[in-house]
Amino acid sequence: MGASSYLYLLTEGRLLIDAGLRPGQMGEAALPRLELLAEHPPSAMILTHAHLDHVAALPVVLRRFPALKVYCTPATARLAALTLADTFKIGQRQGQALFGARDLQRALAALTPIPYFERIADHGFAFTLFPAGHLLGAASVLIESSAGTVFHTADVNNVATHVTPPAWMPAEVTPVDAVVSESTYGDTLLPARKEQVRSFVAATAQTLVQGGKVLIPSFALGRAQDIALILQSAIAGRQLPQVPVYLDGLTREVTTTYEELLPLLPEALQNRAETSRQPPFLSGAVQVVKDKEQREKIIGSKGPAVVISSSGMLHAGVSPLYARQWLPNPENALFIVGYQDAEAPGRRLLELENGGEVMLPDPDGEGFSSVAAYAQVQRYYLSAHADRGGLLGMIHRYDPGKVILTHGETAPRHALKSFLDTKKDVALPAAGEAVSLKDSGRRRRAFLSVPVAKTPEAIKQRHRRFATELNYDPNHHVLVLQLPKEIPGSLFADGTYTVEVVRGHLTKVKLTEHQKGTGEENADSALNAVELE
């Protein structure tokens, strides 16, 4: 996780995708393996989105390859400028700057904005950017070369949020030779977003009503704006008391930029802003913290308040300043709303069961020291990453021969691999490792297969297989199963059946309760299990 950077060695040239820094690390330790580019200079580069772990090493790359053309969406170009400027400022303050002001200006000048769905073929190979749903301007990449096609998911989300629609996917299965997929939540089926929002608002209300303060460490790009809209709507709907909601740290500049990029935001948000004649984010209870003096007043204030601040993992930014003062008080709350890497202070907080201590950055940024943590700490899954089901669905839609899993800790990557291993040729590359995009030919089954009984006798006794159709009758609100002519109607006894559907395909129908009076109350229901191809 972190320091994301991928070099594609194509027949026609070399394509570099992203160059990020590793959160929580400083100096050279935060960089990707950029020394490998010396042997394979990139012909072109793509930025998939503007998060630090994907763009913050861009000035270092451009210092080595000043003529490199860097493609991204218009929104990514705007937001990347904020990320890079903040990275430069923090590096200067910590005395660990990886690039200077001239490097920063060169990187910004190299950005070439292109729209989604426009095929670029200026470098021998071709590529197209598609909406990834992860962040405003975030893109997945379809790469075409004479050797084949590759779909690079980048960070992707298949669930809509207030500030991003879900990732675009082709209407039909569109085969490619390989998919390079993120795997952040490859071992997790995330709970429904609506339920998580409801629980998050309820917990926030409980803390505020009791007079406590709520700190929400958040990624400045995307997550903070989504949370601000959730709280703004909850206050307007009287689910939360009328309390101030403050944006601090990098979230301030990013939210102001989001206001300016309103035409690129979801249509519902644009309509809301037009109808209310109010800015979509900075209106009502939501306001920015103007300076250090105001921040200190908020930290030391007596009444309830909500602060959304960067960084989201508590390893830098202004979030630790609030956390150091508010965590010792059990009346307060700290809510985690995004991914926490293994070494982040936010992860340590989640691991504390009944309070304890956590290491947080010192106010002067010189080091870390322990802080008592007795405030309520809770996690809410409001992530902008697809979970295991979303990733598998996307991979299935592109039906690749080869799958390469990246951008994930060891457990999620291996878990996702286990779901694909018997159907796809799956690789888990290490940093710096070259991996073939060609299918090794070891695929053994279709992507989704229906398990069969182990012996012919069991198949004969317990399973009858046939192809069929399942249609919905809107007039009677029922599912209608079309039986082939060669299947007798007596196959199904009277009673209650359940159906199992996997990603839009019916896979099993099973009798779960016999209707009384049929004379078959004691029959083995397994005899009526039907699997469909």
Image (spheres, rainbow, N blue to C red):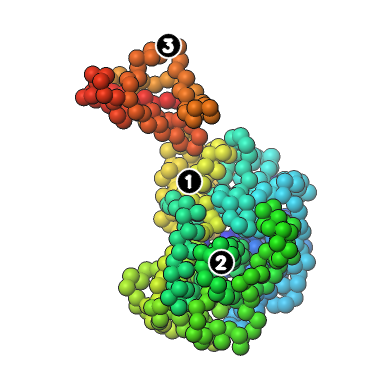
Q: Label 2: which residue?
A: 235
Q: Secondary structure at mark 3?
A: loop
The residue shown at (57%, 75%) is: 244
Q: Label 3: which residue?
A: 486
**Residue 232 visible somewhere in the drawing:** yes
Comparing 403 with 237, the one in front is 237
Upstream in sequence: badge 3 or badge 2: 2
Q: Secondary structure at mark 2?
A: helix
Q: Work out whether 12 lies above or below 54.
A: above
Tell me residue 466's x, y (percent): 42, 20
The residue shown at (36%, 24%) is: 530
Q: Which mark is residue 389?
A: 1
Q: Secondary structure at mark 1?
A: helix
Q: Quadrant of residue 174?
A: top right
Tell me residue 119's x, y (percent): 75, 45
- Mark-to-mark CA distance, 3 and 1: 36 Å
Comparing 512 with 401, the one in front is 512
Comparing 308 with 305, the one in front is 305
Frontmost of labels 1 and 2 is: 2
Q: Work out whether 29 lies above or below 434.
A: below
Q: Quadrant of residue 250?
A: bottom right
**In the displayed structure image, the side of residue 515 where residue 338 appears, left or right:** right
Amino acid identity at mark 2: Ile
Comparing 60 with 120, the one in front is 120
The residue shown at (43%, 30%) is: 507
Q: Work out whether 1 lies above or below 424.
A: below
Frontmost of labels 3 and 1 is: 3
Tell me residue 372's x, y (percent): 38, 81
